[in-house]
Amino acid sequence: MSADHRDRPLTVNALPLPREGEKPVAAGKVLGSYLRRLRREQGLTIKDAAPVIRASVSKISRMERGENPPRERDVLDLVDHYGVRDPHQVEAVRELLKQATAKAWYDEYADVTPGWLKRLIGLEDSAVEIRTYEVHVVPGLLQTPSYAKAIVTSGLPNANETEVKRRVDLRMARQRLLQGPGRPQLVALLDEAILRRPVGNADVMAEQLEYLLDAAERSGITIRVVEFMKGAKIAPSTPVTYLKFAPGGPAELVYLEQAAGAMYISSTSGVESYRYVLSELWGAAASRKKTMELLRGAIKDYAGHPSRRRR
């Protein structure tokens, strides 16, 4: 590495001006992408940059991916080390820092939000497109309160009423991102087993499936059922969610939900492989007309369930 790297002219594109009300995760991703471009413009590796802020290589990598809220001192020290002297650019960095570390709406639910889920919610908030394949249950972004409550109660049998309500309220609050301007496009692929796997009672299931019928009519939401026979050979055994973001940071990411946590994949090859899987599932999924028929058929079965006839 050359000792006079900071004297090299900066040809990297200027930092995009922060948008008013930029969400914390989105602002962090833009800032991280800018730091990476600056470092590369100076011909530095992550290993070269780490000593500047007495950090590990992994910490620098996380900062550049926008995975954790950045520390102001760390960011400003790196920007200075990379040779940024334009006061307007430094001020733009400070503004993005302010937005990236701002309190997000979901911080209100910190008591029932593990770190891996908090990150997903932040990513959902900044996504322009969400494609998901679910194996066992309706995606959280499309669950009704009763369905969500049945899932939480089943998964956390020792949780008290307050905790259950908090978790359900959080799930319902997440769904606000599908409303109003700027909402992401949502494509939900559902394994056919979801329609037939009872969650709660027959009333809960009928209500949930009716909600899916209604949701499928809304702009920006596409729902398809992957039938047993067609999806058997290509469907993964665990849920997959693909998120695409607006320009200014990493373009896309894959979220894999696990029993007690989650895995995030951002490598080009990893994202590409799961994008391919989702594409194959889309090709195997039932048409819109057939999906609606499958939903209505399941609703009819739940409506005629003995537990409802006894009412």
Image: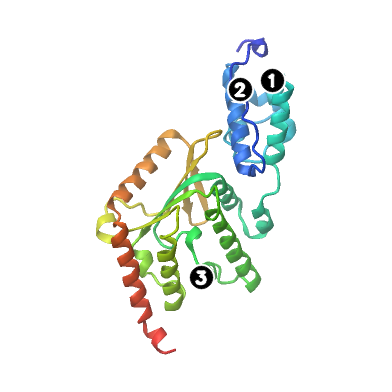
Dot 2 falls on a residue whose secondary structure is helix
Outermost left residue: 229
3 and 1 marks in contact (CB < 8 Å):
no
Q: Nearer the viewer, residue 310 or 86?
A: 86
From this view, report whether residue 169 is shown above or below residue 28.
Answer: below
* Circle 1 crowding by C-alpha within 10 Å: few under 14, some 14–19, many from 20: some
Q: CA distance from mark 2 to mark 1?
A: 9 Å
Quarter of the figure with the N terminus: top right
- Residue that mark 3 sits on: 154
Mark drawn on residue 84? 1
Residue 294 appears in the picture as rendered? yes
- Does label 2 or label 1 sit earlier along the sequence? 2
Q: Is residue 11 left or right of residue 211?
A: right
Q: CA distance from mark 3 to mark 2?
A: 49 Å
Instruction: Provide the secondary structure element on which disc 1 rests.
Output: loop
**Could you tell which of marks 3 and 1 lies nearer the N-terminus?**
1
Spot occupied by residue 196 in the image (x, y as percentages of width and height):
35, 69
- First in residue order: circle 3 vs circle 2: 2
**Where does label 2 land, which residue?**
38
